[in-house]
Image: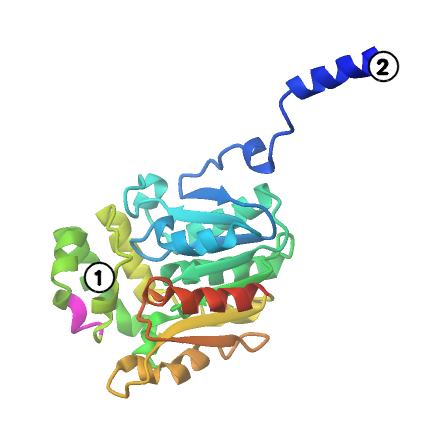
Amino acid sequence: MTRLFALLSVLLLALPGPASAQSRERPFASDRILVETRGRGPDVILIPGLASTGDVWQRTADRLDDDHRVHIVSIRGFGEVPPGRNQDGALVAPVAAELRRYIAERQLERPAVIGHSMGGLVALKAAADAGRDRRNPIGRVMVVDATPFFPALISPGATSGDVEPIAQIAYQALLLLGDAALRNQPTLIGRELGGAADSVFGSLGWQGGDRQVLAQGLYEVMTTDLRHRLPDITAPVTVVYGWSPDAANPRARLDAAFQTAYRSLRAPARFERIEGAEHMVMIDQPQRFLAAVGRFLG
């Protein structure tokens, strides 16, 4: 009997160990998004903004993956990621639908979703849709320097119709000149956007990409209005944004604008302003941002 146990022990040691959850999973097949998964624990999904890939979340993922399973999204057509179907038609709604398909296919249990800029719009849309069908709920949402209607930060009374002509100019400019030209000459449309173009095109997160996808993304960032969908969101929402104590800086006056933007949520949002940060909050003030993420997940 002792010899039998010894033989079994040798055989068992020679066998490969059980595959990790990560290695068992097949790559998620999507013509809209790519997802990299790291770590183990509660699920956190990170969505980048316009012209950014999952690389902008590197520091955040490095902090979280010791005790969370981190899902780093890259939207096709941004950076060096091939555009796939994002080259044709709408962007925010299809990407949000694909995010929900990912959550369902991977059987994620009430994941936390963090979205920056356009990624914040995607997170809000996905959370609103999830709140309606309740089959694959999202646990909590953090939007980073994003609102359900971006132009309202500049003009609270603005509507999609008001912004449409300016959005069309931005769309055509990107198609004509490409992101490199606009990155070097943000004033081409900066005046019309109230200076908003400077923070987008001049940010460290701008990685360029396919000009059709970039043009559509910029157009949708300027015209998408999800304010009427906020009551559909059942998950708690945290809003993080860059702020300055300098009265001459436009960011010193954003508190009221952000609070007004989210007032129709079922439950009041939690607001976290990050002093010294501009649009790329997680890059501008990484330690303060990570502290806010810790409070969000805690």
Q: Is 191 contained in the magenta span?
A: yes
Query: Which of the two marks, 1 or 2, is nearer to us in this view?
Result: 2
Q: Position of residue 279 (x, y in %)?
A: 32, 68
Horizontal side of 191 relative to 131 (left or right) equals left
The residue tagged 2 is 2
Q: Nearer the viewer, residue 273 or 159?
A: 273
Q: Position of residue 121 (x, y in %)?
A: 42, 62
Using a 10 Å C-alpha cutoff, classify the residue at mark 2 as few (fewer than 14 neighbours), some (14 to 19) or many (20 or more): few
Q: Position of residue 206 (x, y in %)?
A: 26, 56
Predominant secondary structure in magenta? loop
The residue tagged 1 is 201
Residue 237 lies, with reference to residue 217, above or below; the image says: below
Residue in the picture at 55% in, 71% down: 231
Q: Is 245 contained in the magenta span?
A: no
Per the rendered image, the range of residues in magenta is: 189-193
Horizontal side of 3 relative to 210 (left or right) equals right
Secondary structure at numbered mark 2 = helix
Q: Amino acid at mark 2?
A: Thr
